[in-house]
Amino acid sequence: MSALLWALVALPLGAGVLLLVVGRRADRAAPGVALAVAASALGLAVTAAFRHPSARAPFLDGLPMRLTVDGLSGLLAVTVTAVTLVVLLFSAAEFGSGEARARFFGLMLLFAGSMLVTVTAATLPVLLMGWEVMGATSWALIGYWWRDPERTSAADTAFLTTRTADLGLYLAAGAALASGGGRNSNSSLSLDGLARADEPWLSFITAGVVVAALGKSAQLPFSFWLSKAMRGPSPVSALLHSATMVVAGAYLLLRTGPLLDASGWGDDVVAWTGAATAILLGLVAIAQADLKQLLAASSCAQIGFMVLAAGAGATTGGTLQLVAHAAAKSLLFLAAGAWLTALGTQQLPALLGAARHHRTVGTAFTVAALSLAGLPPLSLWAAKDVLLAGALERSPWLYAAGLAGALLSAVYSAKALWFVWRPAVARPDARRIPAGAVWPLVLLAFACVALVVPAFPPVRDSVSRVLAASGQPAPAAWEFVLSAGLALLAAAGAWGWGARPLPLAARVKSGFADWLGLERAAHVLLVAPTMRLARAAAAFDDRVLDRAVEGSASATVRLARWTNDVVERAVDGTVGAVAAGTRALGRWARRPQTGQLHQYLAQAVAAFTVLAVVLVLVR
């Protein structure tokens, strides 16, 4: 059983590293290798989801490396590998042969493998390893076209923002170790054991986990980094936004639900942060004129529902939302990438008629957008109501906030559909979308329809049993009808409004279009003070430390010169005088040494005489 789990995480990680090491020599073989590895990983993930294997290996003294697959991680592992396979199928057909394909496919496999480590980790150190590799590979993928300074700058922004939030996991790990007193680090660092910590460590652990999760999932106030991530290739956006890095934070919050509840405050903070993100980033999505920026803001908003579910204890609804969102959002980003390649733009006004020009892609895009809008009978419509039932049980106001976020989903989805389906002039210069890049979109469109089934009994009850989430609230029939009716009205209103500007103040519209000014705020509150501190430290180093070091060196040189001129001369003189005296004594001592026996006898007699006289006088 453990071999199955080791193979699941080692296969994509090992193949990804191998492709990166071989480099351009493997460009031709890279797509085939990546697809074979992704398909094998999917088979292993499905098997692991049924068998629930565990694995253990020595790592640190008293702290082994532990991986495990349970209901939640099993569903996530299948979702990650399935979406990875579909995205790589699209990439194999769409990615040009002149690109560094071994580097691209190697990084994608490494990215997916690190997500698998994250979802199967049973302890915080293992989670941290997967978490860190995932962040590093996301930076490399966003900046894949590294010769473009704007893309590398965007990758740096995304990496540094998430990296700052990731420090929360180190805080949580340190607090967990402190709460265990060092006696049983294996138990204190287990994800299932975090909720058993005592105060004040419990609050530190909760705060660290919440900050790291919100940063990774681009929730407020960290949402702006996801806008920068759009600089990467479209397949990267599709995988990053749907089933890997951005949902890792939501997964962590769903996994650590008992911790949020035990803290007494974490569940409320998480639930309301998710609701606020769903509303505010929904408004940001509506204000966008760029399709990929609209989809990026919608990712923040949709993941806000998962975060809301984690805070409300609606584990089943949050998981269903995560899986359904993975299918819909990967399809939307892949379709946007196909249009970008074919038409050379991702601006909504320039995409007029794009769905009419590429009918199959347009139809698949429509299915995913209608699912995102929450219209029946598609998957996200039902999944949202399952999680909103948990919000209603906790607070009517929380339910109302979630329902408002759902209405905004319908508005920005209808806005995107309005542009791509409007009649437009002929596009004689449009490129043809390869057939190999189209049928993965069709497959994902079928998934958007089929994934509505798990939201209804008896499959929903089975999902709850698999997740070990007993007592989950079930939505009433009126909730399904209410959300569907409101979503339909909101979508119809957005369609009727069309491209007319919103009757809002220019500053308000620019604020939402600029992602609430979150990046500027981060620069003002964090980056600028850090840079000022760095410049002050550099000035202190130059003006104080450097001068102190140079002054010490100068004083040392002067002391050495004085020592050479004065002390050494005195020492040399003393040594010379001692040597001269010793030589004089030697000359005097040699004078009696004549070699004449009678002289030696006379000297001995004289000496004994003197000695006798002394002895007489002393007595």
Image (cartoon, rainbow, N blue to C red):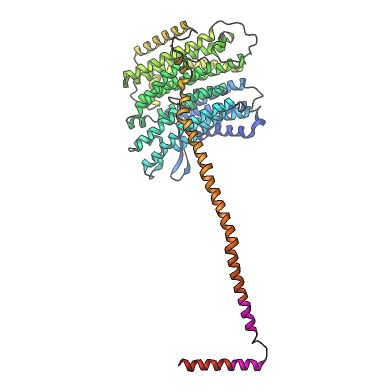
Q: Is residue 413 left or right of residue 104?
A: left
Q: Nearer the viewer, residue 557 or 113?
A: 557
- Residue 183 is a magenta residue: no
- Would you say residue 474 is visible in this rendering? no
Main secondary structure type of the part rendered in magenta? helix
Q: Nearer the viewer, residue 538 or 340?
A: 538
- Would you say residue 571 is visible in this rendering? yes
**What is the number of callouts on the image?**
0
Identify which residue is drawn at 41% across, 8% down: 489
Q: Where is residue 560, by image quadrant? A: bottom right
Q: Nearer the viewer, residue 89 or 213?
A: 213
Q: Is residue 260 left or right of residue 3?
A: left
Identify which residue is drawn at 55% across, 33% down: 13
Using the image, determine if residue 545 lies above or below residue 377: below
State the image coordinates of residue 35 (x, y, percent, origin top left). 59, 26
Identify which residue is drawn at 39% across, 31% down: 256
Using the image, determine if residue 313 lies above or below residue 610: above
Identify which residue is drawn at 45% across, 16% down: 507
Q: Nearer the viewer, residue 225 or 132?
A: 225
Q: Where is residue 438, by image quadrant? A: top right
- Residue 590 is a magenta residue: yes
Q: Is residue 492 left or right of residue 137?
A: left
Using the image, determine if residue 115 lies above or below residue 447: below
State the image coordinates of residue 127 (x, y, percent, origin top left). 46, 34
State the image coordinates of residue 81 (x, y, percent, origin top left). 52, 26
The C terminus appears in which quarter of the rendering?
Answer: bottom left
Q: Where is residue 25, by image quadrant? A: top right
Using the image, determine if residue 597 lies above or below residue 195: below
State the image coordinates of residue 77 (x, y, percent, origin top left). 48, 28
Numbered range of the magenta stretch? 581-605
